[in-house]
């Protein structure tokens, strides 16, 4: 019978395997058969019957002490039920019995990664021998989490993992090389959807692509990986009920997006709008606890596959479904591809188009979506009559303080954006600014600068334009509030292009540093336009690189005006649309009703 169970499982005949396991489970004579109970536990776990799997594995462990197999199944059960610490204890016991078991080591490290315990993951990997390709990959993930770019690149190459190598190269800002790595991964395995999605993300930062070329990549992804376009759902009459609006995200946790949801969601008009959150998260945290009360209805859907989640959303009768994550990690865009609601829109979390044919609208504003933005989107642009963002600054951000240049004797320009945004055109423009402003400095703050190799590469890029290394401050500040405090040394923030900064731009403005920004391809190159327009600082948003350089140089040449700007910028922002969530909620309510 045990051999039959194993054969059925190996053949993928899961229904027959389940019936066989149920027969064993019902047989009193099998209760003392350790291998039988172990086999049943594996089948029940694979079929999602957690209760029976727990009962069978408890018997197996009592009958088969000191064996790694039952311990490993119990670890998987603990992980499935969210008991991470118990799972880790069982995995540690397995490794004590079989220290060279690479599959068990990999499972332990992956779980530590999910928990954010990268130091423990590094300790485990240091004991691994030999290192398999999967363990090299996991070592690279661990190294990258600490900003160790050079080591992470080496491990990715040793693991022969081109897709992950692309991710490492992106962290260092080497976009063209990253895209080449993703292309290699797709060539090796055309069904590797993750490599395709990673390339979409990288392409957002590729200055060589115009809006139409970028859109074409998203359309190609949809054709390859999405199911056939479903029929449109009928929009039922309200009949006196409220419009049901659902937010779908895997980031309803301690993530920057909560500072853009918390000012808006509580202010939806509850006489007209009923809100639902579909939280696709594995590990709820304090951010989850803070966001949960903001929604009238909360659904924990991390365990649901795309079909089940789409069915659950339809069962809730959602009228307007809002994607707030796009093509970020653990995306649920395929739920939208299944047409889970009559009206579907994307907003906030990703910035680019989705490529999903069943996604009806892209929610933005006139600055993010200027005339002609249709060329960049697979969705229909929906322009709100005000800025499409509202920001709730994190608790603990310090006061900006006086203009740093007055004390330092020189102007400090800065960007705290990730290096993936700093293409050669950006470096050339920033070098031109430094060359035109005597004694000025540039402060770049990014995780990659933990790595000496990344620092040297950035210094070399500026040296080509005559900028000495001593005029660059390249470092990474952590944890908070260290980064916010670092803004107190910044006089002027420089916005990258063709992909503008996001959260870092809001933080810079709140900390009193005005932003020089360049209008580029919409919508990703228009964040800066949206922010400066909302603040009444339209003259800080420029249309050409030469004018961008000239604007930064002019701002650095008038320290009195810059000092006045710093002193009043937080107050200006506080009363602007950028901090007015109530107004944004009102226009979004009107948009949802009009879309529906």
Image (spheres, helix red, strand yellow):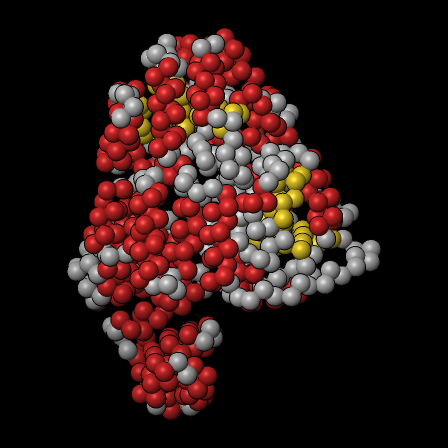
Q: Is residue 305 above or below residue 20?
A: above
The percent coordinates of residue 419 (x first, y second) are 36, 36
Q: Is residue 583 above or below residue 189?
A: above
Residue at point 60%, 27% (across, down)? 533
Residue farthest toward the right in the current orientation of the protein: 240
The percent coordinates of residue 379 (x first, y second) are 60, 50
Task: Decide which of 508, 31 is in the foreground and name it.
Answer: 508
Residue 223 in view of the camera: yes
Image quadrant containing the N terminus:
bottom left
Residue at point 55%, 67% (across, down)? 228
Quarter of image, res 484: top left
Seen in the image, is 147 located left or right of residue 571? left
The percent coordinates of residue 388 (x first, y second) are 62, 37
Quarter of image, res 468: top left
Residue at point 36%, 18% (across, down)? 434
Q: Is residue 292 above or below residue 2?
A: above
Q: Is residue 537 above or below residue 359?
A: above
Residue at point 21%, 61% (across, down)? 132
The percent coordinates of residue 292 (x first, y second) are 59, 49
Seen in the image, is 6 located left or right of residue 391? left
Seen in the image, is 110 located left or right of residue 537? left
How many numbered marks, from 0 up?
A: 0
Seen in the image, is 539 located left or right of residue 178? right
Residue 486 in view of the camera: no
């Amino acid at each position: 019978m045990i051999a039959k169970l194993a054969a059925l499982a190996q053949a993928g005949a899961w229904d027959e395997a389940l019936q066989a396991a149920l027969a064993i489970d019902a047989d009193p004579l099998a209760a003392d058969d350790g291998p039988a109970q172990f086999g049943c536990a594996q089948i029940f776990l694979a079929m999602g019957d957690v209760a029976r799997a727990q009962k069978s594995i408890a018997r197996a462990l009592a009958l088969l002490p000191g064996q790694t197999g039952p311990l490993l199944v119990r670890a998987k059960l603990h992980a499935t039920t969210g008991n991470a610490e118990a799972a880790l204890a069982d995995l540690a016991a397995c490794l004590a019995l079989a220290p060279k078991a690479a599959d068990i080591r990999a499972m332990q490290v992956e779980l530590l990664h999910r928990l954010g315990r990268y130091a423990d993951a590094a300790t485990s990997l240091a004991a691994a021998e030999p290192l398999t390709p999967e363990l090299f990959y996991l070592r690279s993930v661990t190294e990258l989490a600490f900003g160790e770019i050079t080591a992470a690149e080496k491990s990715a190459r040793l693991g022969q993992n081109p897709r992950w190598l692309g991710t490492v190269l992106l962290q260092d800002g080497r976009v063209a090389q990253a895209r080449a790595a993703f292309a290699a991964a797709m060539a090796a395995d055309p069904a590797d959807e993750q490599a395709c999605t990673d390339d979409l993300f990288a392409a957002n930062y590729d200055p060589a692509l115009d809006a139409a070329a970028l859109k074409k990549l998203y359309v190609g992804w949809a054709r390859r990986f999405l199911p056939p376009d479903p029929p449109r759902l009928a929009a039922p009459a309200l009949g006196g009920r409220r419009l049901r609006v659902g937010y779908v995200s895997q980031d309803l946790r301690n993530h920057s997006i909560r500072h853009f949801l918390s000012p808006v969601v509580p202010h939806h008009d509850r006489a007209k709008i009923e809100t639902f959150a579909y939280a696709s998260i594995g590990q709820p945290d304090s951010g989850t606890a803070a966001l949960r009360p903001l929604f009238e209805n909360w659904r924990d859907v991390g365990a649901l596959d795309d079909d089940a989640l789409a069915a659950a959303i339809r069962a809730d009768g959602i009228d307007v479904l809002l994607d707030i994550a796009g093509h970020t990690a653990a995306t649920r865009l395929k739920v939208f591809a299944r047409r889970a609601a009559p009206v579907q829109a994307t907003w906030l979390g990703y910035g680019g188009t989705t490529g999903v044919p069943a996604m009806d609208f892209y929610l933005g504003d006139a600055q993010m979506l200027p005339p002609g933005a249709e060329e960049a989107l697979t969705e229909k642009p929906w322009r709100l009559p005000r800025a499409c963002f509202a920001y709730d600054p994190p608790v603990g951000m310090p006061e900006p303080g006086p203009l740093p240049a007055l004390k330092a004797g020189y102007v400090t320009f800065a960007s705290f954006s990730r290096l993936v945004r700093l293409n050669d055109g950006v470096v050339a423009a920033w070098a031109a600014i430094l060359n035109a402003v005597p004694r000025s400095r540039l402060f770049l703050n990014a995780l990659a600068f933990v790595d000496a190799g990344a620092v040297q590469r950035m210094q070399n890029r500026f040296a080509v334009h005559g900028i000495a290394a001593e005029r660059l401050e390249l470092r990474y500040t952590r944890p908070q509030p260290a980064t916010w405090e670092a803004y107190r040394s910044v006089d002027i923030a420089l916005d990258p292009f063709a992909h503008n900064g996001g959260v870092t731009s809001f933080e810079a403005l709140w900390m009193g540093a005005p932003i020089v920004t360049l209008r580029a391809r919409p919508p990703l190159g228009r964040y800066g336009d949206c922010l400066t327009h909302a603040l009444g600082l339209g003259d800080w948003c420029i249309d050409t690189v030469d004018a961008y350089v000239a604007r930064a140089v002019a701002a650095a040449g008038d320290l009195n005006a810059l000092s006045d700007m710093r002193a009043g910028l937080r107050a200006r922002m506080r009363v602007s649309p950028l901090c007015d969530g109530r107004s944004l909620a009102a226009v979004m309510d009107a948009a949802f009703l009009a879309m529906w």
